[in-house]
Amino acid sequence: MKLLITAPFTEDGITRLKNMGIDVDYRSWLDTGKLYLGDSFLSVLKESGAEMVIVEGDEIKEEVIERTNLKFIGCVRGGPNNISIPAATEKQVPVVSVPGRNTVAVTELTIALILNQARRIAVAKEFIDDDFFVDDFGDFARLYSHTMGFELNGKILGIIGLGNIGFEVAKRLDSFNMEILVFDPYVDKGRLSEVNGRAVELEELLKESDVVTVHCPPNDETRGMLGKDQFALMKKTAIFINTARASITDEYALLHALKNRIIAAAGLDVFSMEPVDGDNIFLELDNVTVTPHIGGNTIQTIERQSTALVEAIRIFLDGGVPENTLNPEVLT
């Protein structure tokens, strides 16, 4: 059986697949620089002759599924909205995802963005890079005044969404001796207790928190949840972090809040226009740290997704139902 992989994959994972007797056609988007949207993936599949596929962002919608003879679809994402699950189910094609593959990576970037803004790390570098020289001690005093930050110890952390990533962020920042407030209508009480968190309404969280970080899923319920009125509730000294999805915020309201110092600063990894380049509107601001959607971009993320999907394919070929099959009924 032939397998086309367009997601990043480890050499070890490819070797293990080949040892199963699978003909692997590896075309990672990191190497090709290509993303296939709409029905454009159809020609790639036909050219490859693959019966199984592993993708990251490539779209496998109704037309692609209907016009091919796929036997297995793997997606390295946790929630693959780029794949039509109903169409795959209709054709009895299992779809397997990899939830949690980048949980640790996004968690650690979130904390890095918080620390960067709290301790004004990027500001300090920019200040020094801007032809800064110390001629007397007054210059050093000016540097210190410009880069003065605050400690997280004793501050209030507001977490919007205590899912896998929100929970891991809370666990780590609990050790910073931060008070943790959580807004999540579906919060697990045991999970909340484990991080010494307190469930509150969104308005209270925004008013009380020194750091607000977003970790809820993008859906109809959360779309545009944070806008002008919500940012106006926050402390003028507050830091806002978003490593979830840009759709959860009104991006122009956030830009206005940052430009007018309604809130102090932000660390942003997600945007309405991606991939990010030098035209990003937030790059104009000196109180924002912009990262180009690199939350899950670690070696370990690729290792996890590779290991998980190699095992899923092994189980599938042995006639079983792989873990995290999104339509297991097609195999039972």
Image: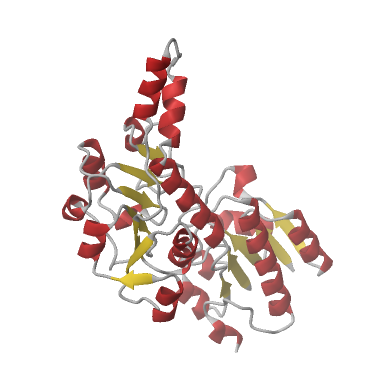
Query: Where is the C terminus found, in terms of image quarters?
Result: bottom right
Left or right of residue 232: residue 241: right
Tell me if 306 is positioned left or right of 116 in this view. Answer: right
| Horizontal relation, residue 240 to residue 195: left or right | left
In this view of the protein, which residue sits in the foreground, 179 or 121? Answer: 179
Query: Percent x, y for residue 103?
Result: 53, 62
Q: Is residue 70 visible?
A: no
Residue 67 picture location, percent across and down: 54, 67
Q: In the rendered image, which quarter is residue 162 located in?
A: bottom left
Return the residue nearer the eye: 168 or 29: 168
**Whole-percent x, y for residue 139 in the image:** 39, 16
Is 116 located above or below residue 180 in the figure?
above
Q: Is residue 180 above or below residue 251?
A: below
| 311 versus 287 height, above or below | below
Q: Where residue 229 appears, x then y in whole percent? A: 16, 54
State the residue lying farthest toward the front: 137
Name the residue: 80% across, 60% down.
Answer: 15
- For the point 20% across and 43% down, the residue is 262
From the image, which quarter does the N terminus lie in?
A: bottom right
Q: In this figure, which colouring scheme has been used for the structure?
A: secondary structure
